[in-house]
Amino acid sequence: MWHSALMTSLKATDLLNTSKTIAIVGVSNKADRPSYGVAEYLMKNSHYELFFVNPAITELFGKPVYPSLEAVSEVSARIDIVDVFRKIEDMPGILDEAIAIGAKSFWMQLGLRDDALADRGRAAGLIVIQDLCIKIEHEKSHRL
């Protein structure tokens, strides 16, 4: 079991080191939400071009928030990581959007896992990460 977790973490580190753009789906403007903390951390501590997705808000940290991944694809030629903060029931539709826009990877945050969905994403050519926090993995990969 630990070997599998280590391999997933190594794959996540490689993905983080080679990516340039991240779309955070389900980002919140509430400071007590994990998605807010991750977005704030990445803005302050990473080189990524960030795109926020949530149809309920229009701006976060002075940046526009898009209603969908499709709307993001209209302003960015490529999304490397689709980082998802939504309940597992919402994942199939978000995965469909990620595939449609030609995203490189699909990242389900800590506590989110759906092996059948992950298999479908991999079959469509995406790198799929499950049950890991992008902030924690970024911190691990950038320790001095």
Image: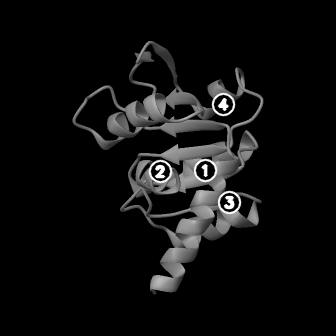
Mark 4 or mark 1: name the one nearer the start of the chain: 1
**Where 141 sits versus 130, above or below?**
above
User: In the image as oriented, which residue stretches furthest toward the front?
Assistant: 144
x%, y% of residue 7?
58, 75
| Three-letter residue code for mark 3 | Ile
Instruction: Tell whether label 1 touches label 2 (CB within 8 Å).
Output: yes
Numbered mark located on residue 127 in the image: 3
Q: Considering depth in this image, is 90 or 79 the residue closer to the camera?
A: 79
**Where 30 sits versus 60, above or below?**
below
Numbered mark located on residue 16 in the image: 1
Instruction: Tell whether label 4 touches label 3 (CB within 8 Å).
Output: no
Numbered mark located on residue 46 in the image: none
| Three-letter residue code for mark 2 | Ile
Residue that numbered label 2 is attached to: 134
Label 3: how many Cα within 10 Å (few below 14, some 14–19, many 20+): many
Residue that numbered label 4 is attached to: 70
x%, y% of residue 54?
45, 29
